[in-house]
Image (cartoon, rainbow, N blue to C red):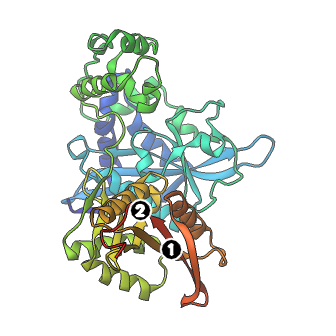
Amino acid sequence: MNLNIRLETPADHHSVEALTREAFWIDADSQPYTNEHLLVHKLRQSPNFIPELDYVAELDGRIVGHIIYTKAEIVPEGGPACETLTFGPLSVLPECQNQGVGRALMTFTIAEARRLGYTSIVFFGHPDYYPRFGFRRAAEFGLTAWDGQTFDAFMAVELTDGGLAGVQGRFREDPAFSAMTAEETAAFDKQFPPKAPREKTPIGALLTRLEPAARAAVESLGLEYVGEIHRLSEREVSRLPGVDGRALDVIRAVLKENGRIWGRAPAHTVKEVRSAGMKSDICNIILRALPDWFGIEESLVSYVREVRDMPFFAAFDGSGDAHGFAALKFHNEYTAEVYVMGVLKPYHRHGLGWRLMDRCVEECRRTGRVFLTVKTLDQSRADEGYDKTRRFYHAMGFRPLEVFPTLWDENNPCLFMVKYLGGENEHANR
């Protein structure tokens, strides 16, 4: 899919509002009407609107996606408000959904917001989708909604290291988000072709397919229609007493029958990459996205060249995009080295590094290696990013062996770490 992402223009306004109406019409399966298209219209008139972060995605000259950002505030108890960003609606035409349009808009605009100097984003959205972009529960940052509540759908992400450090309080978004009446929506909706309301599937269609314990748990939610479940995360539903993996599968299936994809995004799959060109491409893209770790051009180019001939593993998402990789260098029959490893920053602390390292260990054991080593920056040079890297390696079982002060250069002391893999190489006692 060859997408063109560009700023929205006034000539796009009606098309974008019509697109947004189509994208959110599915919500009429659980509520009387949809008003996100009116929300887009009102947000453009707000002083909090950010034109520099108002983007559309085009496919073959047709607008198929849109995202809009506005300024918001975090209001601490008894202190001045702190600026943050929020976004939404994020809209993709139904026939183009699950094809990477939303992901492309999110990835592009998050990077653009960071470039413009914003430090955080706080918003309400589906907690089974947005963590792939680095979002976490806002409660982890000490934030609550304006009414003091917190829940999985209330999320935040730091655009800079420590972007929300020391910032706690209640989140306040533009008044337009809560200032739309049914009458105003109906009047605005007359600008668009009539649409038949979506059929609302009673919750009983799900309850009859659940085991008694799970049925009682879902009944306790007091839902009227099946579509209402999509507002809850898989984590929230899985914590209900009586809801097990089988019940979650039934809920996913029923929602899918009603046109909704629900639940966590498919897990990343770690695969070995054998194409030399693909190894270099993945290495180049990911390392260039990590300038805090790989900011020396000469070293980066060397990594990209050398990995072509090494065992190479990458973590792919359900769409086939690589979000992390690790390359192994076999030094001899006993020892291998994690030659280079990188995970895109939005996917840090999502388990990709652990899974890649596990695959490296598996390959080393398969080939009879006894030790796995890695080189990283020593703690004698202060660097917050590499502090996290060393903690990761330590958690994976690596231990410091020696420091080489000038192996790289005097400003980058090299810490040599080793992990014992257990067992003995067949030649170890010769």
Question: Camera-side residue: 190 or 314?
Answer: 314
Residue corresponding to mark 2: 421
Q: Visible in this render: residue 323?
A: no
Q: Visible in this render: residue 93?
A: yes
Q: List x then y, in percent, for residue 267.
A: 33, 46
Q: List x then y, in percent, for residue 307.
A: 30, 78
Q: Residues within 10 Å of mark 2 (few under 14, many from 20)?
A: some
In the image, residue 245 above or below residue 139: above
Q: Does dot 2 land on a helix, a strand or a loop?
A: loop
Q: Is residue 236 left or right of residue 320?
A: right
Question: Camera-side residue: 44 or 136?
Answer: 136
**Whole-Å distance between the Cαs marked 1 and 2?**
27 Å
Question: Which is more foreground, mark 1 or mark 2?
Answer: 2
In the image, residue 421 above or below residue 226: below
The residue type indicated by label 1 comes to Trp
At a point 30% along the width and 63% down the height, the residue shown is 363
At a point 66% along the width and 75% down the height, the residue shown is 382
Furthest-front residue in view?
Answer: 430
Q: Does dot 1 land on a helix, a strand or a loop?
A: loop
Q: Which mark is residue 293?
A: 1
Q: Quadrant of the C terminus?
A: bottom left
Q: Quadrant of the N terminus?
A: bottom left
Q: Residues within 10 Å of mark 1 (few under 14, many from 20)?
A: some
The residue type indicated by label 2 comes to Leu
